[in-house]
Amino acid sequence: MLSSMHCYLPALLLLMSMPLQAQWYQTRAGIMGTNIQVEVWAESPQQGQQALNLVINEMHRIDALMSPYKADSELSKINQLAGQQTVVISSEMLELLQTSQHMSQRTQGAFDITFASIGFLYDYRQQQKPEQQQIKPLLAAIDYRHVQLDIEAKTVFFANPNVKIDLGGIAKGHAVDNAIGLLQQAGIKHALVTAGGDTRLLGDKNGKPWMVGIRDPRNPEREAVVLPLQNIALSTSGDYERYFEQDGQRYHHILSPKSGESPHEVQSVSIIGEQSTLTDGLSTAVFVLGVKAGIDLLNRIPGYEGIIMDNQRKLHYTEALQPNQ
Ligand code: ADP
Ligand code: MG
């Protein structure tokens, strides 16, 4: 008896070292100039690791395509050439430029990727900002209508030679949507993918909604609101992500296309809705629009809700999110 058990012992040990139960797998990384966080529920370490890799690789792929800091990115190539000639672009870039255009049209130009025509003059790390005399002559370059797309030929042309574009207000949401799509294809049913202020949730967490916090814009340790969420995207735009202060003014990374300067009516905007690409774009747009115009806009868009913290730290909600009703 003893000896026969001895024979089975290696096999038994092997069995015990194999995962008998599904579990959560998670990772963090710094990509696209921001913090990436991924959690997936997987059947085995192999499936878990593969799923995490899918997401991380996708983030790197999109960063290589859309980073304004990489001279060889597709975005940089467009910025170098499209002021002088039509430039053939990838289907993915074309689609995101179209989505950006729709976002501009729906937000009365508050979301506008040509903000970068002046935006490139800011360096938040070096605490550099343009002077009024630099801003003024370039204001005419901020107008999404300058970005001319030929859908059939898959080209872009800038109708004003001073135009520069930047997808920072929408690319992370796009990356999160793509990542969730890849996880679904891989058979994952429960996941969280976060890129900076953009999060999307697949399914629930252990049979309950995920509890997702919106941070206090003036205290990174504190959460201003916690929301129970599942199968949905949440994006937050805040004036605390990238900024510096000079002469009592806060210069942050969201710019009003009208002035080329940071708006100060609100401190943070969070948007909930199905697609991360849209919640991302809308959070940036509503930040620019401010409380009244922002809430009015959201109340007209079915399936998308928002919470705004204004500069007096008062919270404003769209109709469907009004607390205690
Ligand atoms: P983050 O998650 O980086 O905080 P946001 O969704 O808040 O991103 O968007 C901020 C980014 O959007 C900026 O860093 C800039 O790249 C871009 N951006 C700034 N102003 C505008 C604007 N008016 N329209 C579109 N994009 C903008
Ligand atoms: Mg955004």
Image (cartoon, rainbow, N blue to C red):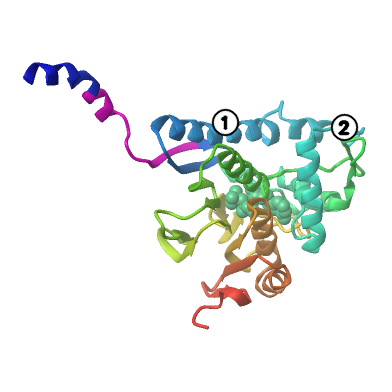
Magenta-colored span? 12-29
Dividing the picture into quadrants, the one containing residue 79 is top right
Q: Position of residue 102 (x, y in %)?
A: 80, 55
Q: Where is residue 119 in the image (x, y as percent from the top left)?
A: 71, 47
Q: Of marks 1 and 2, which one's residue comes earlier in the chain? A: 1
Q: Which residue is drawn at 85% across and 49% down?
A: 141
User: Nearest the camera: 310 or 282?
Assistant: 282
Question: Mark 2 highlights which residue?
Answer: 87
Q: Does the magenta stretch include residue 93?
A: no
- Pick the residue in front: 143 or 107: 107
Q: Which residue is drawn at 65% across and 35% down?
A: 62
Task: Indicate the amino acid at tag 1.
Answer: Asn
Q: What element carries label 1?
A: helix
- Type of residue at label 2? Val
Q: In which quarter of the image is residue 164?
A: top right
Determine the secondary structure under disc 2: strand
Q: Is residue 295 visible?
A: yes
Q: Which residue lies furthest to the bottom in this view?
A: 325
Residue 190 in percent (x, y) is at: 48, 48
